[in-house]
Image (cartoon, rainbow, N blue to C red):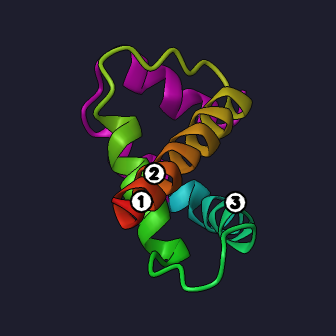
Amino acid sequence: MSDVTRILTAIGQGDAKGADKLLPLDYEELRRLAAQKMSRESPGQTLQATALVHEAYLRLINEKSCGWDSRTRFFTAAAEAMRRILIENARHKNS
């Protein structure tokens, strides 16, 4: 079991400090994921990849029932959170 999986299990069991341990372990990979998502956005996007990572991470750790039992599920949830943030941002710009 990887460190990330152990931390995700602890978070799922209510360990409030687990979230503080998770971000440093996966920050670079989350940053790459955010940069990949941002590369598909139209020019003029004001949101930066770093801000996208932080916003997605805050949303993820504030979920009541995360259900992450593996690194893969965590990154799937992170990608979905980033996608939703980008959609919300685009809708806000268009309104």
For discs 3 and 1, the disc positioned in front in the rendered view: 1
Up/down of 26 relative to 65, above or below: below
Mark seen at residue 89: 1
Q: Secondary structure at mark 3?
A: helix
* Residue type marked 1: Asn
Whole-angstrom CA distance, mark 1 to mark 2, is: 6 Å
Decide: few, some or many residues near mark 1? Use Cα within 10 Å; few <14, some 14-19, many ≥20.
some
Q: Secondary structure at mark 2?
A: helix
Where is residue 82 drawn, in percent x and y? Answer: 54, 50
Magenta segment, prevailing SS (helix, strand or loop)? helix
Where is residue 58 drawn, in percent x and y? Answer: 33, 48
For discs 3 and 2, the disc positioned in front in the rendered view: 2
Residue 18 part of the magenta segment: yes
Quarter of the figure with the N terminus: top right
In the rendered structure, the answer to whether residue 80 lies left or right of residue 76 reads left
* Residue type marked 3: Leu
Q: Which residues are magenta?
A: 1-23
Where is residue 46 drawn, in percent x and y? Answer: 45, 81
Where is residue 2 drawn, in percent x and y? Answer: 70, 35
Q: Nearer the viewer, residue 69 or 47?
A: 47
Q: Earlier in the sequence, mark 3 or mark 2?
A: 3
Whole-angstrom CA distance, mark 3 to mark 2, is: 13 Å
The answer to the question of whether label 3 and label 1 lie on touching residues, with beta carbons closer than 8 A, is: no
The answer to the question of whether label 1 and label 2 lie on touching residues, with beta carbons closer than 8 A, is: yes
Q: Earlier in the sequence, mark 3 or mark 1?
A: 3
Residue that label 3 marks: 33
Quarter of the figure with the C terminus: bottom left
Res. 39 image quadrant: bottom right
* Residue type marked 2: Ile
Residue that label 2 marks: 85
Residue extending furthest toward the front? 95
* Residue plotted at (57% across, 42% down): 78
